[in-house]
């Protein structure tokens, strides 16, 4: 999804076991600080959806994060995931 006038994209990012932020909570993951994106939701492997996840929500391998941000920031996050 693309919001043209704002230059923002909404994308799904798959979290691999080797991601630097696996088994960390959102606050400690550094995702927002390092990549300047917002995690809108997390879809667990079980299918459970966590909308507007709290800072203490853990990021697990196999999660799919739904994130909002500029294209180049999303690309950098995808490489880190």
Image: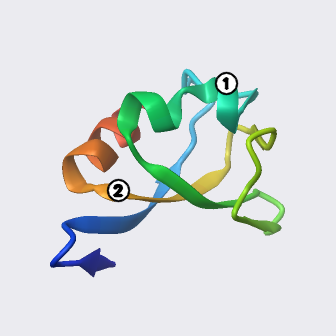
Q: Residues within 10 Å of mark 1 (few under 14, many from 20)?
A: some
Q: Which mark is residue 28?
A: 1
SS class, disc 2:
strand
x, y (%) of residue 4? Answer: 17, 78
Picture colour scheme: rainbow
Look at the numbered disc 1 and give the secondary structure of its residue.
Answer: helix
Q: Is residue 4 left or right of residue 54?
A: left
- Percent across and percent down for residue 48 are 82, 67
Dot 2, crowdedness within 10 Å: few (<14), some or many (≥20)?
Answer: many
Based on the displayed image, in which of its 4 quarters is residue 66 positioned? bottom right
Residue at position x 73%, y 56% from top?
A: 53
The N terminus lies in quadrant: bottom left
Q: Give how far apart the Cα atoms at labels 2 and 1 are.
A: 19 Å
* Point 26% across, 55% down: residue: 70
For this rendering, which residue is in front, 59 or 39?
39
**Is residue 81 among what the camera can see?**
no
Q: Is residue 53 visible?
A: yes
Residue 2 picture location, percent across and down? 27, 77
The residue located at (40%, 28%) in the rendering is 34
- Report the disc number at residue 53: none
Q: Which quarter of the picture shows residue 10?
A: bottom left
Q: Position of residue 16 (x, y in %)?
A: 57, 36
Q: Name the one closer to the observer, 36 or 44.
A: 36
Q: Is residue 81 above or below residue 28?
A: below
21 sits left or right of 36 in the view: right
Nearer-the-camera pick, 60 or 2: 2
Residue annotated with mark 2: 69
């Amino acid at each position: 999804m693309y919001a043209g006038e704002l230059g923002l994209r909404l994308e799904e990012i798959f979290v691999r076991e080797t991601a630097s932020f696996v088994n960390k909570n959102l606050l400690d993951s550094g995702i927002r600080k390092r990549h300047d994106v917002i995690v809108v939701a997390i879809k667990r492997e079980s299918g459970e959806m966590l909308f507007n996840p709290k800072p203490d929500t853990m990021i697990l391998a196999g999660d799919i994060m739904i994130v909002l941000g500029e294209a180049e920031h999303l690309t950098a996050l995808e490489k880190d995931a």
